[in-house]
């Protein structure tokens, strides 16, 4: 086999391995991961492995109720370290934490 033939075989194998991953990533509702995966190779693998976006084809047709709840929570609730503290006023002025008993 010549070097050109080996190059074509390797290119074909890479395409055959990555094409289904691009398709799965797209079906999971992550078009930006697909686009980024074209330029940064492992990105589309992360998109294909992680949970699908709620409302995507993959979410509607492949997930049972438990997985749908997990996906919904993952995409539409913030982690505990990002959530606002209880009693915080969203959009209002922040109270000075150095002053005790002050309410905004």
Image (cartoon, rainbow, N blue to C red):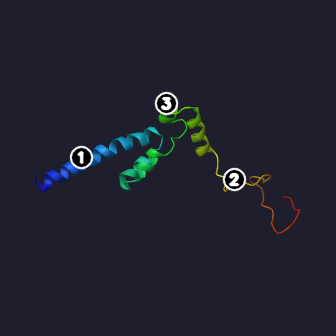
Element assignment for label 3: helix
Locate residue 44 relative to residue 7 in the image: left or right: right
Element assignment for label 2: loop
User: In this orientation, which residue lies closer to the viewer: 36 or 92?
Assistant: 36
**Cα distance in 3D space between marks 2 and 3:** 31 Å
Q: Earlier in the sequence, mark 1 or mark 3?
A: 1
Location of residue 99 (image quadrant): bottom right
User: In the rendered image, which residue does mark 1 sit on?
Assistant: 12
- Image spot of residue 18 (x, y percent): 33, 46
Q: Is residue 44 above or below residue 26?
A: below
User: In the rendered image, which residue does mark 2 sit on?
Assistant: 83
Q: Could you tell me which residue is drawn at 44 percent across and 38 percent down? A: 27
Q: Which mark is residue 69?
A: none
Q: How many marks?
A: 3
Q: Which mark is residue 61?
A: 3
User: In this orientation, which residue lies closer to the viewer: 17 or 92?
Assistant: 17
């Amino acid at each position: 086999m010549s070097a050109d033939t080996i190059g074509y075989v390797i290119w074909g194998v890479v395409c055959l391995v990555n094409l289904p991953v691009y398709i799965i990533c797209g079906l999971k509702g992550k078009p930006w991961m697909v686009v980024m995966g074209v330029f940064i190779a492992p990105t589309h693998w992360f998109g294909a492995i992680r949970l699908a976006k709620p409302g995507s084809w993959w979410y509607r047709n492949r997930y049972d109720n438990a997985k749908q709840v997990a996906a919904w929570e993952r995409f539409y609730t913030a982690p505990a370290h990002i959530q606002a503290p209880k009693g915080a006023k969203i959009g209002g002025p922040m109270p000075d934490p150095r002053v005790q008993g002050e309410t905004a």
